[in-house]
Amino acid sequence: MRIHKFFGVFPFPTWQMDVDGVLGQQTYKDDDFEKAGADEKESFIEMKPSLSYWQDAWRRLKKNQVAMVSLFIIILMILFAFVGPLFYDYDYTTQFRGEENIDPNWRYPFGTDNHGRDLFVRTMFGARISLVIGIVASLIVLVIGSTYGAISGYFGGRVDDIMMRIVELIYSVPDILVVLLLSTALKPALTEWFNTSTSQLAKALSVLGPSLIAIFIAFGLLYWVGMARIIRGQVLMLKEQEYVTAAKALGASSSRVIRRHLLPNCIGQIIVTTCLQIPAAIFLESFLSFLGVGVSAPLTSLGSMSSDALGGMYTYPHRLIIPATLLSLLILSLNLFGDGLRDALDPRLKK
């Protein structure tokens, strides 16, 4: 660094580097100034492969051992519920006379009940019913909650205030009471419709029964509020982004902005909330079926099987332990996988 005198009295530094002095201290060869080859460039700069959002999420999800074990258990349960019954020539209603109350053996791995029905097959169908109810109920929550929350967050202002006050009012309604009241009120009318109507819809709904229909109605009326609040918060943040402003400037309608720009960018929160809603729906159905107001006989679920096993709990404890264990394992796995999926899809946790 060179020093200059300021007005002949004070030295004043300048930030001009003395290049000649620095270069004079080094000894260079002729090949030091040759261009680097491809191998040298590749070893000098390590380029990481470009990953998409979903590839990066899957990479982080695989590192979560608890979530991967939970996913493996969920896949086994799905195969058990949907593929297992294909290997049997009978279903959950088939009764074998003279083979009532048989202990587990090679032919009946879970034994038979007091009606001579194969508990192994009934468990598979019960797991199927619980999974289907959880998935259908979560899809109802997904459609209603995401649409409601996106509209509320996008328009904001007075519209948002009114819509959120409605959400807070729904939060105060006891959901179990609504399900019981709906089941009681709908049962006479639905039963009469099932018995008198010849339509395919009536035949399909008669298999579910009034109680399950009441559960689906309750999910459509009450259980979407959590999804709505989450999506509203995301839309309030996303609607200020430049691409939303550009879409508006190009003349895009509000519905198009919500459908094509806002909701796709909330897909991570939507997937996680939907996955966490499935075990909640399964637990609600199992709880109501255990109380006797869920699935209607002869249809079965894991909750109704646990309820049926109470009468012989001390004589045949395996009838209660098996469906209760499968139900607990299924709900626990879904919750743990949902937590791992939330961590994997959160860009703030990206490493």
Image (cartoon, grey):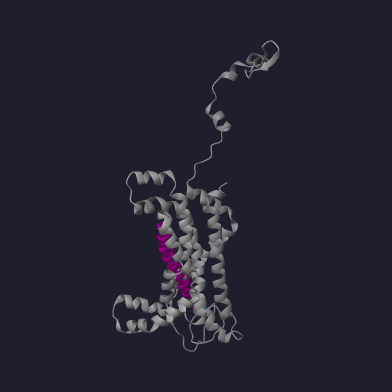
| Residue 155 vs residue 40, the one in the foreground | 155
State which region is magenta. 122-151
Q: Is residue 319 above or below residue 86?
A: below
| Residue 231 vs residue 292, the one in the foreground | 231
Q: Is residue 59 above or below residue 272?
A: above
| Residue 294 seen in the figure | no
Q: Position of residue 27 (x, y in %)?
A: 66, 16
Quadrant hosting residue 298: bottom left
Residue ID at (48%, 58%): 230
Q: Is residue 21 above or below residue 156?
A: above
Picture quarter with the N terminus: top right
Principal secondary structure, stretch drawn in magenta? helix
Q: Position of residue 116 (x, y in %)?
A: 49, 85
Q: Is residue 127 left or right of residue 3?
A: left
Residue ID at (58%, 77%): 321
Residue ID at (45%, 53%): 235
